[in-house]
């Protein structure tokens, strides 16, 4: 079932979202200071292509906390709110609930990407 969900997701927006995240990551990686942020953008891009069958596991490391605070100040909150709004809209229909749940997963990763691991279910 996750294969069908990934195909539908990829065709109806996943490819565009993943490409945008990779481009943003490349821009961040142009500077030495921005490389950690760029790597997190690559993580978000990889999950944006095919989110079904994957899970986000958060860790509580101190360095991750400091980098996540920096991330929140410079755009993480807006990204998480955007994904949460899309999730609520999609969950209003029965057909959209699985896609809404994937947006909630992306919102969780967009809020705290540093120290998060993407694992297969």
Image (cartoon, rainbow, N blue to C red):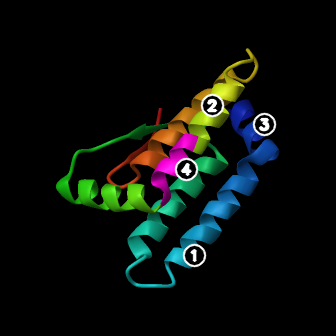
Secondary element at image label 2: helix
Most extreme residue toward the top, as rendered?
Answer: 94
Residue 88 occupies which quadrant of the picture?
A: top right
Q: Which residue is mark 1?
A: 26
Task: State which region is magenta.
Answer: 75-81
What distance separates the C-alpha of mark 4 from that of mark 1?
A: 18 Å
Q: Residue at x 22, y 45 (%)?
A: 60
29, above or below 2, in the image: below
Q: Which residue is mark 3?
A: 8
80 is within the stretch colored magenta: yes
Front disc: 3 or 2: 2
50, above or below 98, in the image: below
What distance separates the C-alpha of mark 3 from that of mark 4?
A: 22 Å
Locate residue 108 relative to residue 1 in the image: left or right.
left
Q: Which residue is mark 2?
A: 87
Front disc: 2 or 1: 2
Q: Which residue is mark 4?
A: 79
């Amino acid at each position: 079932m996750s294969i069908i969900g990934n195909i539908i997701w990829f065709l109806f927006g996943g490819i565009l979202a993943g490409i945008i995240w990779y481009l943003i990551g490349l821009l961040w990686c142009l500077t030495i200071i921005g490389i950690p942020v760029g790597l997190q953008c690559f993580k978000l891009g990889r999950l944006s292509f095919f989110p079904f069958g994957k899970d986000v596991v958060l860790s509580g490391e101190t360095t991750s906390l400091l980098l996540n605070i920096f991330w929140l100040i410079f755009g993480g909150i807006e990204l998480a709110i955007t994904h949460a709004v899309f999730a609520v809209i999609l969950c209003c229909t029965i057909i959209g609930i699985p896609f809404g749940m994937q947006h909630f997963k992306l919102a969780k990763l967009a809020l705290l990407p540093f120290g998060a691991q993407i694992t297969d279910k």
